[in-house]
Image (cartoon, helix red, strand yellow):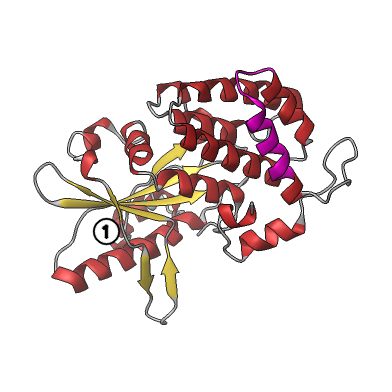
Amino acid sequence: MSDMTNPHDRLIRETLQDKEDAISFFKNSLPEAVIELLDLNGLELTQSSFISENLKEEQTDLLFQIPLKSGKKANIYLLFEHKSYLDEAVFSQLLGYISAIYKSQYRADKKYSVVIPFVFYHGERTWTLGNSFQDRFILSKNEEEVFKKYIPDFELEVFDLSKVDLSKLESITLRVILGVVQKIWEGDTSFLSHLGEVFELLTGLKNESKRVEIFQKLFLYIFNVREIEPTEITSLLSHSRYNREYEDLAMTTAEKLIQKGEMKGKVETKIDIARNMLLDGASLEYVLK
């Protein structure tokens, strides 16, 4: 499982806990044949904790329950990975979670619902692990034919952020947040140029309180991940359609993350206090108080 305090993971998790944004995301990331069978408007975020046989709690990233148009339900199981490397362990990891979900289903009503393992991949390298668990076994063609019936095979739905055209997403929130995550490792000039476009895109969000919330999350995310001066952010804001309020919000956020007076060209360090607060599970709102 991804570290829940990972800033990438935290931002995506919080974003997809919004029902409308989750629906928009799945409409544009699941196969059309799957979407045709699902009543996405009935999507619900459900309990994602399971007790393993050794009595240790296993916490999935996000687990959604979506009704089938036929009247039955399928559980969409999502595991978000924001690693900068390819990790083959994700297959066995998902297998363990899927098994726990099926055990939970059977204990509840002696029936099984379909589980679709979904990986959100945000790495610097292209996803090359494929999507089949069976393909991870090193077997000759003959050996595979003989032993494949003993392998608990399943396929992943992989969302590789680096290959996604975000302009196709209906949700402005998703286009903005995923757009920043998608470009977060680019050089300063390219990143800041893209960030300016993102800020302009937010003008299409009419809900003022949500707009402020998104700005707040983005500022905290950016200052946690990149070494960037708040003045570079406020400069972008001053040339956009936004007023002083958002420039002040950027500076206030930075001041919570950086020791006052410690700026030298670029931010020298991400402040340990804020990071430790996040490690302890503090909410974004609490960190910014």
Q: Nearer the viewer, residue 26 or 215?
A: 215
Q: What is the number of callouts on the image?
A: 1
| Residue occupying the point 47% across, 49% down | 13
Viewer can see residue 245: yes
Q: Is residue 217 left or right of residue 208?
A: right
Asked if residue 120 is positioned above or below residue 147 in the image, the reply reads: above
Q: Outermost residue toward the bottom?
A: 54
Q: Nearer the viewer, residue 92 or 63?
A: 63
Q: Outermost residue toward the front?
A: 244
Image position, residue 182 (x, y; %): 57, 33
Q: Main secondary structure of the magenta part?
A: helix
Q: Is residue 219 left or right of residue 18?
A: right
**Mark 1 lies on residue:** 149
Queried whether the magenta region covers residue 244, the answer comes back as: yes
Queried whether the magenta region covers residue 95, the answer comes back as: no
Image position, residue 256 (x, y; %): 72, 50
Viewer can see residue 165: no
| Residue occupying the point 57% across, 53% down | 285
Q: Is residue 70 left or right of residue 87?
A: left
Which portion, as a residue range, is magenta? 239-254
Q: Outermost residue toward the left?
A: 70
Disc 1, SS: helix
| Residue occupying the point 51% across, 33% down | 211
Image position, residue 277 (x, y; %): 65, 62
Image position, residue 63 (x, y; %): 35, 55
Asked if residue 157 is positioned above or below residue 2 in the image, the reply reads: above
Which quarter of the figure has residue 125? top right
